[in-house]
Image (cartoon, rainbow, N blue to C red):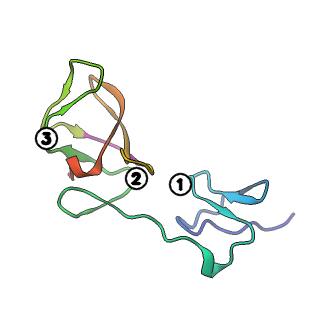
Amino acid sequence: MSKLPNCPRCNSEFTYEDGSQYICPECAHEWRKDAGAANVEMARVWKDANGNVLQDGDSVTVIKDLKIKGSSSVVKVGTKVKNIRLIDGDHDIDCKIDGIGAMQLKSEFVKKA
C-alpha cells in the first residue's frame, strides 16, 4: 500500500485520494496530486474584529446585534458561541447558537472569548 502525503494545511495523516487530488477529512483541504511543495497554497488566516487569529473549535462572542434573514429573531450582542468551524466564503464561521440553531456568521462581528 502506498503512503499518501500528510495534509499541507493541518499535517493530518488521514488524507485520501479522489481522482486527481488529495483530500484531508479533518480540515477539508483539497490539493492536486501533481502539486509540489512550492505550489501548495498558503493557508487562509481568519481574524476576529480585534485582529485575533481564529481557529476551529474556538469560542467567540458576538459584538453586534445581528438580524437573522427571513426571521424576526435577533442574535443579541454578548451571545457566546462555542466550538466554531471556519469555512471559506462571505460568512466564514459555521456554528450552532443555543436557542437559534445552525447558522453562519461573519468573523468581523465576533471577538475571541
Mark 1 vs mark 3: which is more N-terminal? 1
Residue with the mark numbered 2: 56
Say which amino acid is labelled 3. Answer: Lys
Residue 31, above or below 82: below
Query: Do we see residue 15 in this rendering?
Result: no
**Magenta run includes residue 84:** yes
Give the quarter of the image for residue 23.
Answer: bottom right
Q: Which mark is residue 27?
A: 1
Labels 1 & 2 near each other (Cβ < 8 A): yes
Query: What kind of secondary structure does the magenta stretch mostly adopt?
Result: loop
Mark 1–mark 2 distance (CA, rounded to whole Å) = 9 Å
In this rendering, position of residue 7 left or right of residue 75:
right
Residue 107 as seen in the image, left or right of residue 23: left
**Which image quarter holds the N terminus?**
bottom right
Would you say the residues marked 2 and 3 are in contact, meaning their CB atoms lie under 8 Å apart?
no
Q: Label 1 to label 3, Cα distance in Å?
A: 29 Å
Please name the residue shown 57% across and 57% down the image: 29
Question: Does the magenta-highlighted stretch encompass residue 56?
Answer: no
Question: Helix or strand or loop: what does disc 1 sit on?
Answer: loop
Please name the amino acid that badge 1 sits on: Cys
Query: Which amino acid, by three-letter code, is at mark 2?
Result: Asp
**Please, is residue 103 above or below residue 31 in the view?**
above
The magenta-colored residue range is 81-85
